[in-house]
Image (spheres, grey):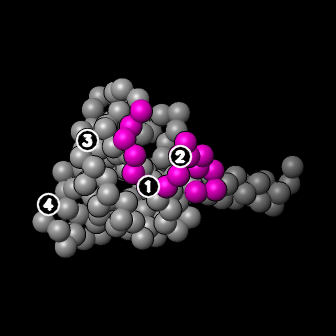
Amino acid sequence: MSSPLRLLALVSVCLLVLAGVWLWLARDGGGAEVVDGSSHSGWMTIRYEGVRVDIPASWERVDRDGCEFEFEVWAPRPHSDSCTWAGGVAFYRSATFDPAHEAGVRRAESRGEPEWGGYTYAGDLAVYASDDDREIVLRVLQSAA
């Protein structure tokens, strides 16, 4: 192989490696972020892919890396098994969201889940919230915009 071809091959490989590193680093940059305090005491506002939602200030982002479904979740009681649903708010793509009931709040039918749950659509997302306190679920869903 001639010297110019080797140099071209080396530059191409370096560019591919750099592009791969950039894509890998950018993959987690789309998580929700706290954008400001809420107008309600004890609440905060988060934004995920252009959708803003008010949640209780005690809720924290759950690390779902390595889970079967790696959607964005903020929960009141993060626990050791972050892949198990324990309540909070989750963001799903509305195009692939397959609800079991109509939008709104309902009493949970399964044991081991928070007592109340429901969803609404905002932007290109379905926002799902659940908690033992129905008023919290209502406030979260009503704030989604």
Which part of the image, by quadrant, shows the C terminus?
Answer: bottom left
Residue 51 is inside the magenta segment:
no
Q: Which residue carries the number 2 mark?
A: 101
Quadrant position of residue 112: top left
19 or 53, nearer to the observer:
53
Q: Which residues, given as a range, are shown in magenta?
A: 94-109
Q: Are marks 1 and 2 in contact (CB under 8 Å)?
A: yes
Please report contact status of discs 2 and 4: CB closer than 8 Å, yes or no.
no
Q: Amino acid at mark 2?
A: His
Q: Position of residue 91 (x, y in %)?
A: 46, 53
Residue count near mark 4 (Cα–Cα under 10 Å), binned few <14, some 14–19, many ≥20: few
Residue shown at 29%/61% (left/top)? Answer: 139
Identify the mark at residue 132; answer none if there is no mark. Answer: 3
Name which residue lies at 22% across and 69% down: 38
Q: Earlier in the sequence, mark 1 or mark 4?
A: 4
Could you classify mark 3 by the number of other residues whose Cα lies within 10 Å: few (under 14), some (14-19), or many (20 or more)?
some
Q: Residues within 10 Å of mark 1 (few under 14, many from 20)?
A: some
In the image shown, does 34 or 55 lie closer to the viewer? Answer: 55
Residue at disc 3, secondary structure: loop
Q: Secondary structure at mark 2?
A: loop
- Per the model, the C-alpha gap separating discs 1 and 4 is 23 Å
Disc 4 residue type (three-letter): Gly
Q: Residue at x 19, y 73 (%)?
A: 39
Between the C-alphas of marks 2 and 3, the distance is: 19 Å
Which residue occupies the extreme right position in the image? 1
Residue 68 in percent (x, y) is at 53, 33
- Give the SS element for disc 4: loop
Q: Is residue 126 left or right of residue 136?
A: right
